[in-house]
Image (cartoon, rainbow, N blue to C red):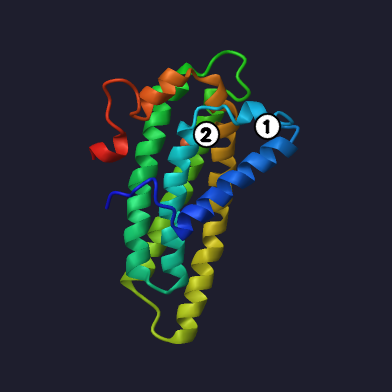
Amino acid sequence: MPTNPQQETPSDQTSSSASAQRRAERSQSPDLPGAGAPSQADHAPPYFEREHRRLDREFHEHLLAIAGGSFILARQHVQRWRLALARHTAIEDTRLLPHVPDGARWNARLYRLEHARITALADAHAARVEAVSENPPRDDRSTRETILSLLDAAQALRHMLEHHHQREEVALAFELPPALQAAAWGHGPGTQPHDQAS
Ligand SMILES: [Fe+2]
Ligand SMILES: [Fe+2]
């Protein structure tokens, strides 16, 4: 179902909070580009942050479904999120990472390694959710135990995603030409936003 970017939902607010937290961490961490220079950070092209917020929203809906014990719905959300994540990663791998300039904060190989780790974690998590949805717990206590187990298991993936998104938003967003980013994410002249094209 298409989403209206003008409409703020509770999960939008959650992902907005995640983005705000990333900006705050960026301004406080001496290890990250943009540290101590929030005005520069505020002028980064918005594409990475916007795309990451879309992914965050879908994953948040998935976690809410788990928390409510709706494992079929959780599987549907995780499948949609996996497709969106795969498309997102493919765009970065094929259209953006080949253009990481010499002297970039982190090289393309690091991003690709993280993509591989995220993909493996995401596949493992999706398989876990699918197994539960096909063989759901039969009583209240087992349901609560399953919810706790799935949410615990998702933590490593969430942390990896958060850290990876932060790298891209504080480094790649500044290092790659804005026109290249716009074209890659479907916002360039003569292109259609990729999330509406499918
Ligand atoms: Fe990435
Ligand atoms: Fe990304």
Q: Upstream in the sequence, badge 2 or badge 1?
A: 1
Q: At label 1, which amino acid type do we have?
A: Pro
Q: Is residue 157 visible?
A: no
Q: Is residue 189 above or below residue 2?
A: above
Residue 193 left/right relative to 129? left
Determine whether the residue tagged by mark 1 lies in a helix, strand or loop.
helix
Q: Residue at x 47, y 57 (%)?
A: 11
Q: Residue at x 46, y 20 (%)?
A: 178
- Which of the 4 quarters of the picture holds residue 19? top right
Task: Judge by depth and name the residue closer to the eye, 108 or 91.
Answer: 91
Residue 78 position within the rendered picture, expressed as x and y whole percent measured from the top left: 37, 56
Residue at the left extreme, as displayed = 198
Question: In the figure, is residue 141 to the left or right of 190?
Answer: right
Residue 59 placement (x, y as % from top left): 44, 54
Vertical placement of 101 versus 173: above or below? above
Q: Which mark is residue 182?
A: none
- Say which amino acid is labelled 2: Leu
The percent coordinates of residue 95 (x first, y second) are 39, 23
Give the numbered dot on residue 38: 1
- Looking at the rendered structure, the secondary structure element under dot 2 is helix
Query: Which mark, residue 113?
Result: 2
Q: Is residue 177 among the parts visible in the rendering?
A: yes
| Residue at x-position 39% and y-position 43% | 85
Residue count near mark 1 (Cα–Cα under 10 Å), binned few <14, some 14–19, many ≥20: some
User: How far apart are labels 2 and 1 at the CA level?
Assistant: 28 Å
126 is higher (above) or lower (below) than 117: below
Q: Dividing the picture into quarters, in which one does residue 96 lie? A: top left
Question: Who's the residue at 53% across and 55% down the image?
Answer: 14
Closer to the eye: label 2 or 1: 1
Residue 123 shown left or right of residue 161 in the figure: left
Quadrant containing the C terminus in the rendered view: top left
